[in-house]
Amino acid sequence: MTQAVVIKSKAYGIHLVLNPEWGFEDLLGAVIEKFKESGAFFKNAQVGISFEGYELSFEQKYDLIAAIEAHTGIHIVCIMEEEQIQEACVLAQTEALIRERVTNHAVFHYGSLQPGDDLHADTGLVVIGNVPKGAKVTAGGSLIVFGALEGFAHAGAYGDGAAYIAALSIDTGQLQIGRILFIPPENGGKKKQKSGFLHRKKEGDTFSPQIARVQDGHVIMEPCTKDLL
């Protein structure tokens, strides 16, 4: 590879192939120049990003993201790890279907929430990102989280017991559907990665999509399949 950086368009957003023979500061400058040339192609896009070829630290990934966003109209909503890319492509292909099945008037929120955030929608709600502990999401209809759900989630907020909550993972979040409250068991104190982007729970893990819904007057949790949505 002779170029410093190659930009590839993927179903989930942007894939950067970085030359490992370059120093990081020079590589950062090259990325900025590259996006100045081609950033218009992604103008105002909300995308995920992945990296290849260069062993980047957590901080270096954020430096690259900040530089890209500062010099383009791109908004990067998640960092994709190798294990997540196949899942992300499936999510991208089914987003239109989710819009239709949740409700024709669903609200889409792009980006992870932060602890203390309180997101509310009178209709169905789709969050493209994580809902960390300390954050709250409320939907008048069903709720889908394309990320980790660890905070408080309430679907069917106006009494709709047929609503559901689906997420790529549900971990120690307090859930409510209609008037029925369910508190999942603790996860045993597993250490979390920093929130703010889609993440795996630990190295080697993949997401295990789950759905919570009301059955016989109780909120039950089960593996999520498209047939249940």
Image: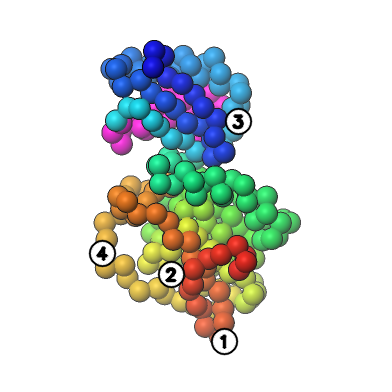
Q: Determine the CA span between mark 3 and mark 4.
A: 39 Å
Residue at x 38%, y 30% (from the top left corner): 52
Residue at x 46%, y 21% (from the top left corner): 6
Q: Determine the CA span between mark 2 and mark 1.
A: 19 Å
Q: Determine the CA span between mark 1 and mark 4.
A: 31 Å
Q: Nearer the viewer, mark 1 or mark 3?
A: 1
Q: Earlier in the sequence, mark 1 or mark 3?
A: 3
Residue at x 61%, y 68% (from the top left corner): 228
Give the residue furthest to the front.
1
**Magenta stretch, residue numbers:** 56-76
Where is mark 1, residue-wise?
216
Where is mark 3, residue-wise?
44
Q: Nearer the viewer, mark 2 or mark 4?
A: 4
Q: Earlier in the sequence, mark 3 or mark 2?
A: 3
Question: Looking at the picture, which amino acid does disc 3 mark?
Answer: Asn
The circle drawn on residue 189 is 4
Q: Determine the CA span between mark 2 and mark 4.
A: 16 Å
Q: Nearer the viewer, mark 2 or mark 1?
A: 1
Question: Looking at the picture, which amino acid does disc 2 mark?
Answer: Gln
Q: Earlier in the sequence, mark 2 or mark 4?
A: 2
The circle drawn on residue 20 is none
Name the residue nearer the viewer: 157 or 171.
171
Determine the main secondary structure of the stretch shown in magenta.
helix
Q: Position of residue 38 (x, y in %)?
A: 56, 18
Q: Position of residue 109 (x, y in %)?
A: 57, 49
Vertically, is 118 above or below 186? Answer: above
Left or right: residue 116 compared with residue 14? left
Give the residue furthest to the right.
104
Q: Secondary structure at mark 2?
A: loop
